[in-house]
């Protein structure tokens, strides 16, 4: 049982580092997309009602990617400090 569920060596902490970097990239990408979407909406004076679903999905993506980044960073630091 210990070989299946026991602690892993410290080199496996790099998985969290890679996932944290990927989450930061995705967060930046969705943030830029949200910014372009809002600017495009303001310049074209589109009604919010038509684009509410897209705005909700992009905002949700930004929030979830930021949460993912923070969680991966936290897990990496916990793994390194152990």
Image (cartoon, rainbow, N blue to C red):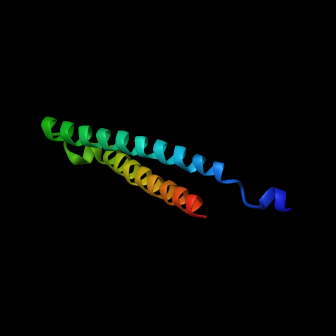
In the rendered view, would you say 5 is above or below 37? Answer: below
- Give the quadrant of the N terminus: bottom right
Q: Which one is in front, 40 or 29?
A: 29
Residue lying at 43% horizontally and 53% vertically, measured from the top left: 64
Residue 33, image quadrant: top left
**Residue 76 in the image, given as x and y percentages of width and height:** 54, 56
Q: Position of 15 compared to 56: left or right?
A: right
Residue lying at 29% horizontally and 39% vertically, measured from the top left: 32
Residue lying at 43% horizontally and 50% vertically, measured from the top left: 65
- Give the quadrant of the C terminus: bottom right
Q: How many marks?
A: 0
In the rendered view, would you say 19 is above or below 75? Answer: above
Q: Which one is in front, 46 or 56?
A: 56
Q: Position of 11 compared to 78: left or right?
A: right
Q: Which one is in front, 9 or 30?
A: 9
**Residue 70 in the image, given as x and y percentages of width and height:** 45, 57
**Residue 74 in the image, given as x and y percentages of width and height:** 50, 60
Residue 25, image quadrant: top left
Q: Position of 13 compared to 31: left or right?
A: right
Q: Which one is in front, 20 or 63?
A: 20
Which residue in the rendered view is the most extreme toward the right? 1
Q: Position of 41 compared to 61: left or right?
A: left
**Residue 30 in the image, given as x and y percentages of width and height:** 36, 42
């Amino acid at each position: 049982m210990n070989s299946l569920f026991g602690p892993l060596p410290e080199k496996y902490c790099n998985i969290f580092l890679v996932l944290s970097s990927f989450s930061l990239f995705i967060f930046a990408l969705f943030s830029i997309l949200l910014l372009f979407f809002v600017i495009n909406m303001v310049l074209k004076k589109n009604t919010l009602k038509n684009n509410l679903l897209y705005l909700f999905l992009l905002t949700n993506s930004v929030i979830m990617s930021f949460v993912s980044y923070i969680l991966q960073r936290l897990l990496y630091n916990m793994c390194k400090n152990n």
